[in-house]
Image (cartoon, rainbow, N blue to C red):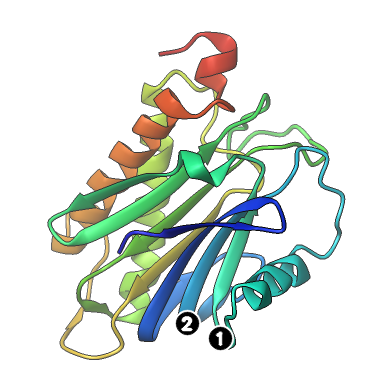
Amino acid sequence: MKPEHHQVAGRSVLLWRTDRPWLAISSAVHGGGIGERAWVLNATVPSDYERDDPGDDVVELAAACGLTEPGTGMLTALDVRQEVTVTDQGVTVTATTGIGAHPTWAAGDETLAWLPGTINVVGWFPVRLTPAALVNAVATAAEAKAQALVEGGVPGTGTPTDAMILLCPTTGPAEAYGGPRSVYGARLARAVHAAVRAGLRTSPMTWSTHHGAD
C-alpha cells in the first residue's frame, strides 16, 4: 500500500487510509503496541522541534486530515516527501531515512540529547501474521535496516528515535513465522533493505550526504 502525500499546517505528511482496520505492531509515538488500526501517519517536524507531547502532535495532524478511527503515527525531521516505497512479492515497505549528523550503534555507550534524524519504516503484509510472527518481523526489519546502513557506510545501526509500524490483515490463515528466512519475513527484509539503501542515496539529511559514504 502506497502513501498519500499531504501538506498539513505547512508540514509534509504521509498518510495511509484503510477501508477496514488492520492488525498493527507499532513503536510509534501515537497508537503504539499491538492492535487494530485504521490509518497510519508519518509527518515531518522542523529541525528545532521542541514539543514534549509528540503523540498529541500526531493526534492533531490526524484530526486535521479528518481521521477519527484508531490509528498510529510517527514523526521525523526528514522531509517525508523523500520517502522510498518498495514492494517485494506482495510485501510493501515505505521508509523515510533520516540519519542527521549523529547515527548511533544500538549497543553504544554514549548518551545523546535529542537530535534531528529518525528512520521510520512502515510495512504492509498481504496475509495475516500471528502476534508472535509480527514481533519476529520487527526484529527482521530492524536487522535489514542495520544491514543497509552498514553497507551504505553509516557508522551506526540507526538513530536513537527510529520507529516502525508493520501491518497485516485481521482475517485469513495466519503465518506463524516472521524471521528473515520465512516466506514473508524474507520479502519484508529485502524490501526494507532496498528502501533504506535507496533513502541513503536520495535523502538530503543522511550521513552519506554529509560525510561522503556511498
| Label 2: element kind | strand
Please identify the quarter of the rendering in which residue 190 is found. Answer: top left
Q: Which residue is mark 2?
A: 37
Q: Out of 142 and 164, give the one closest to the viewer.
A: 164
128 vs 121: above or below: below
* Distance in Å between CA atoms under marks 1 and 2: 5 Å
Counting labels gives 2
Q: Position of residue 47 (x, y in %)?
A: 76, 37
The kind of residue on which mark 1 rests is Pro
User: Quarter of the image containing the C terminus?
Assistant: top left
Q: Out of 106 and 174, give the one closest to the viewer.
A: 174
86 vs 101: above or below: below
Contact between labelled residues 2 and 1, with CB atoms less than 8 Å apart = yes
Q: Which residue is mark 1?
A: 70
The kind of residue on which mark 2 rests is Arg
42 vs 58: above or below: above
x 22%, y 60%: residue: 91
